Amino acid sequence: DHEDVVNVLFEVTCETDLGRITAICADISKISAHPIEAEVLFGLGTCFQIVSTRMDKSFRVFQLKLVNDAASVSKSYFKEKLEELMHI
């Protein structure tokens, strides 16, 4: 019984200017089980920002944006979580 299971789709927006891309990524559409989908494999440690979420038919869609400054995002995230813990 999988009533609490939800299918998920990630839509990722990336900078296409080669001078600004800082993430390692590879187009794997040709070797994918679903070749009509634009599938990209991102390197370990790649950081994304959630832009929005929505339910679409039977799955949740997360719209993500590639973040070039992963250290800044991580620092902000941990600061926010520490503040939450301090107020428990």
Image: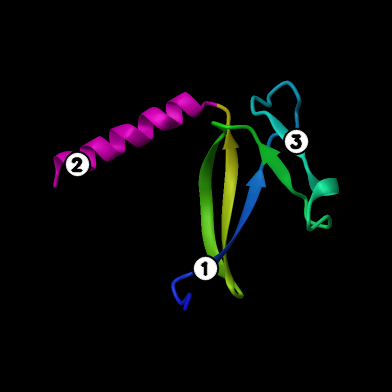
* Number of residues whose C-alpha sits closer than 10 Å to that of mark 2, classed few (under 14), some (14–19) or many (20 or more): few
The answer to whether 44 appears left or right of 75 in the picture is: right
Determine the residue positioned at 57% across, 28% down: 68
Residue 12: x and y in percent read 64, 46
Query: Could you say where residue 57 lies in the image, as x and y percent from the top left?
Result: 61, 75
Q: Residue at x 64, y 28 (%)?
A: 23
Identity, as a three-letter code, of the amino acid under mark 2: Leu
Q: Of the numbered discs in the image, which one, if any, rests on residue 85?
A: 2
Residue that mark 1 sits on: 6
Type of secondary structure dominating the magenta stretch: helix
Between discs 3 and 1, the one toward the N terminus: 1
Label 3 and label 1: CA atoms lie apart by 27 Å
> Dividing the picture into quarters, in which one does residue 13 lie?
top right
What amino acid is labelled 1 in the image? Val
What percent of the width, then of the height, locates residue 2?
Answer: 48, 75
In this rendering, the label closer to the viewer, 2 or 1: 1
